[in-house]
Image (cartoon, coloured by chain):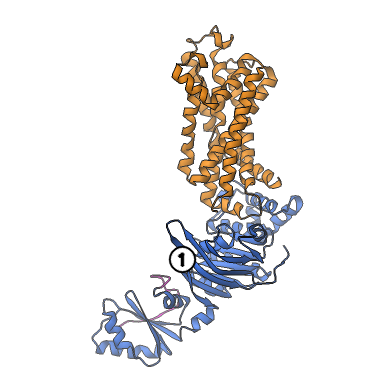
Chain colours: A blue, B orange
Amino acid sequence: MSSTNHGPAIEARALRRTFKGGIEAVRDIELTVAGGEVFGFLGPNGAGKTTTVRMLCTLLPPTSGAARVAGADVVADPALVRRRIGVALQEIGLDPVQTGRELLELQCGLYGLAGRRARARADELLELVGLSDAASRRIKTYSGGMKRRLDLASALVHSPEVLFLDEPTTGLDPASRLTVWDEVRRINATGTTVFLTTQYLEEADKLCDRLAIIDGGRIVAEGTPERLKADMGHDVVSVSLNGADPAATQGALGDLPGLERVIAQTGALALYLEDGAASIAEIVRRLDREGLEVGAISVARPSLDDVFLQATGRRLVEGEEEREREEVAVP
Amino acid sequence: MTETLLLGRRAVREVARYPEATIPTLFIPLFFLAVNIGQVSKTFPSTTSFLHGQGYVAFQLPVSLMFAVATATSGLALVTEIDNGYFDKLLVAPIRRSSIILGRLAADLVRGIGAAAFVLLAGLAFGAHVESGVAGALVIVLLSALFGVAYAGFAILVALRTRNVQATNTSFLLFFPLLFLTPNFVPFERLTPVMETLARLNPVSYVIVGLRSLVIDGWDAGKLAVCLAVTVGMGAVLVALSLRAIATYDR
């Protein structure tokens, strides 16, 4: 489908959605996504990612605010938006009784491609997502990764200007996740704007040109992954309190040389320092001097999780550290 | 129109590939037919005035036809798609929402024709004959299938309103009173006064009477016209409500 939109691919102004019972799922978010970008929407479960996607895809009307997608208003002209977007939602939307080829040919038909053109496009997409050999099998026999790839293919039948992917790798094994990433990069390389929601830090970091972090229905940070991490400082030293008094520990370490910021979290302190490795010895000395017995101390480069911590006061990934850490045992 | 045909073809394919959804819906009418005949054939021999020389199977056949075509299959398929996300995929496609319902109903018509033909043949095998002939048999099958489409509109409405598999599945229970508060075992005039009043208020009665007239009486334009009007009327109301439900879904 040829592009007719020369403005931003996605533009949202004060977009809000309140559900029955006064639940404010999305609160006045502002977004501008340029054409050709891979834009990430990072946040935990229940942050408002899916509600935002559903509003932008015309599946859910906003309570207030406005949004334009691929040049069309999602409320005033939803039919035009639907013609210009492709959507792969969090729930893999497939009909298990059909074969992969039948599903894609039907999808082509719904977008106005019929007969030989539909068959050719279905074959092309099956080849693209590596499902040609399974094309004649019923979808219920597909693995989770195969279903996700087919879902992705079905969102592409009409070569959309903007592709929405709502948590496209949730529940996939690492190998399938990498395959989906490759597909997203390939799709984006053809000029398609990709709006991707995820709760995986690594996915947001490696796949997205720009991202917004959403929490409690609000965008709390926005920028390129590099910029967001760079704004956090140079190194982050995490101190597991292991029962030690948080205020006393923070007091002991609060004036470390090169300290850029301290963020307290449940059971731990995150110290952002100019040179983390060089500060370890001083940290241990000070804790020892104050008689504070802490657990592990680790040093790493700031990640998007640190950006999330800075913005929300808690980590996105509890108990799962995605970065390489250099752990130092405290005597 | 194209999208309705495409979605209808898909739904028909689903019926063919998922026989375990259809076979139980055929077992119940055949079971009722066999049991009812076995229990009351001696009470109502072929000399009974309202049987016009036929066996009781001829009188019961329309009731079994109702059972065969009135299924919640489409509603269940729809609510399953709401659950698994395919419904959203269809909603976000540039098609009219009504085509999603009309496609399902097209499959119900095909399924209804098959189910009604099967039960009618079973009735013939049990000894009934269709007084109105082959043309009458075709009308019986078509009218039954149309009634199935009307009922499907109800199941789809429940599916869209509740978005719940259990609720959609049990919607069939609402059909039971409608089927039994009818002249299903004996004609209107042999019912008790209270039951007769209720049966005469129940539109399903007139569908059964119309179908029965084709089996037992031959061509009775009056009964057929009422049967057709009730079937089409019920269908129009229920399908319109379903179309409204999908038009306002998440709106």
Q: Is residue B13 left or right of residue B192?
A: right
**Outermost residue, bottom direction?**
A257
Q: Position of residue A102 (x, y in %)?
A: 66, 49
Task: Give the residue displayed 26% in from the left and 82% down from the top.
Answer: A293
Residue type, label 1: Ala
Q: Position of residue A227 (x, y in %)?
A: 53, 82
In the displayed structure, B84 sits above or below A170; it is above
| Image quadrant where one finds the N terminus of chain A | bottom right
**Secondary element at tag 1:** loop
Read off the residue under disc 1: A47
Which of the 4 image quarters holds residue A305?
bottom left
Q: Is residue A316 left or right of residue A151?
A: left
Could you tell me what secondary structure mostly forms the magenta stretch?
loop
Q: Dot 1 falls on which chain?
A: A
Magenta-tinted stretch: A315-331
Q: Position of residue B16 (x, y in %)?
A: 61, 38
Q: Is residue A129 visible?
A: no
| Image quadrant where one finds the C terminus of chain A | bottom left
The front one of B193 and A24 is: B193
Per the image, is A320 magenta?
Answer: yes
Q: Is residue B32 visible?
A: yes
In the displayed structure, A305 sits above or below B251; it is below
Task: Give the residue displayed 51% in from the left and 50% down from the top.
Answer: B83
In the displayed structure, A267 sits above or below B165; it is below
In the displayed structure, A46 sits above or below A264; it is above
